[in-house]
Amino acid sequence: MTVPSTDAIDELGDVEPAAPNADAKRRLARAVVAGCDEILDLSHRIHANPETAFEETKASAWIADALRGHGFTVEHPVGSLATAVRGTRQGGRGGERPRVAILAEYDALPGLGHGCGHNTMAASGLGAAIALAALADELPGEIVFLGTPAEERGSGKQIMIDDGLFAGVDAALLFHPCDRSHVQSFPLASEDVEVVFHGLQAHASADPWRGKNALDAMILLFTSVGLWRQQLRPDARVHGIIQEGGTAANIIPERTKAWFMLRSADQAYYGEMADRFRDLVDAAARATATTADVTFSGGAKTMKPNPTLEGRWVENAAAYGIADQGPDPNSGSTDMANVSWVCPTIHPELSIAPEGTPGHSIRFRAAAATSTADRTTVLAAILVAQTAWDLYADPDLLAAAWREFNAT
């Protein structure tokens, strides 16, 4: 479908941007507004067609096609991920540097769809790329667009880092929707953990003593985790679901499977948590005479802040009436934090819903397809493009960002 422009969106093209580079920033804003039908159509199509981690075939193809339409050289797939996208466009002023990366996410949550609003992230990333492409003749270096799969599970960005797709990137920018507006975030270190207990089937009534109950092991593990939480630091989290619990009530379960996530605001403490979790799994297996397989995957790190980039975002956002509300007290995890250890990075958030609307919920999923979310998507595209322009236009700004990066 085509989403029509509204007055609330059109007026974003008339705002006086923050200095420096106000003239270019005004033209970037107008380029985003001019492309808002295409940008918002993408947002709504992705929202209506949710695809989970590593399965984002439609979304990635739509994004790749749109980038080609705006003069980008596109690789899709790229690296080892079938749903990753890389688009590049040379600046008209020549040279290989700087390379500022505009990122996009587009995976959905299992059983919930876009309850994290990644449809708006894909669309805003495309919008920023469209705007920069419109002024590419005035830019040095190269515009880089990276479509990054599997943020909700699997840490697709880390896979792309390992594939070398962030090599030579001078800065990375990515907007995220929220119930409040702020640039600083302190995501928790996190990993997915798959736990499988193996037991032995037997008749649950006739001869249960011949069995080894894998479900008992899983229940013991969940009980142990529940007791452990009392001693965890306040900023640490352990949570999980049972994905397989057996096949019938009258059969001793020989296999159970669960998906856990471990999180901590402190990278070193996270390592202690991972060791303790393994001990809990081993104890549950020993208590039930079962065996266990434990697989860690999809690691996300803590965030490396960059005050130089954060300050530039705050100034650009303030011109559009966005007051920074300070760091979000409620922290999840993101593989964008992994990128922050590769190059100067920001992951600012803008509100698409009333404060207090929980993320990863039906309410937030609904909010991600509203006119409020549409306007925020367009605004995010403008601010990402403007912040990128500041980096292209001012080598000293980029150098300051790298000094901060190297100092921490």
Image: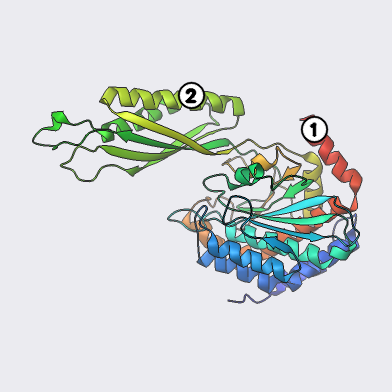
Residue at 67% over, 68% down = 66
Residue identified by numbered label 1: 406
Query: Residue 241 placed where, x, y %?
Result: 38, 42
Q: Residue at x 67, y 72 (%)?
A: 38
Q: Secondary structure at mark 1?
A: helix
Give the residue displayed 62% in from the left and 71% down from the top. 41
The quadrant where residue 284 appears = top left
Q: Is residue 222 left or right of residue 105?
A: left
Residue 302: percent from the left, percent from the top? 63, 35
Horizontal relation, residue 84 to residue 283: left or right: right
Is 349 in front, or is 66?
66
What's the image's color scheme? rainbow
Residue furthest out toward the left: 206
Q: From this viewpoint, is residue 16 visible?
A: no
Dot 1 amino acid type: Asn
Residue assigned mark 2: 275
Neighbour tally class for label 2: few under 14, some 14-19, many 20 plus, Cα within 10 Å = few
Residue 350, x across and y down, in percent: 67, 54
**Label 1: how many Cα within 10 Å (few below 14, some 14–19, many 20+):** few
Label 2 sits on a secondary structure element that is helix
Q: Is residue 58 above or below residue 229?
A: below
**Amino acid type, callout 2:** Asp
Q: Is residue 199 visible?
A: yes
Give the quarter of the image for residue 163.
top right
Relative to 293, does residue 51 appear above or below in the rendering? below
Whole-Å distance between the Cαs marked 1 and 2?
A: 30 Å
Toward the viewer: 238 or 87?
Answer: 87
Q: Nearer the viewer, residue 193 or 380?
A: 193
Q: Quadrant of the N terminus?
A: bottom right
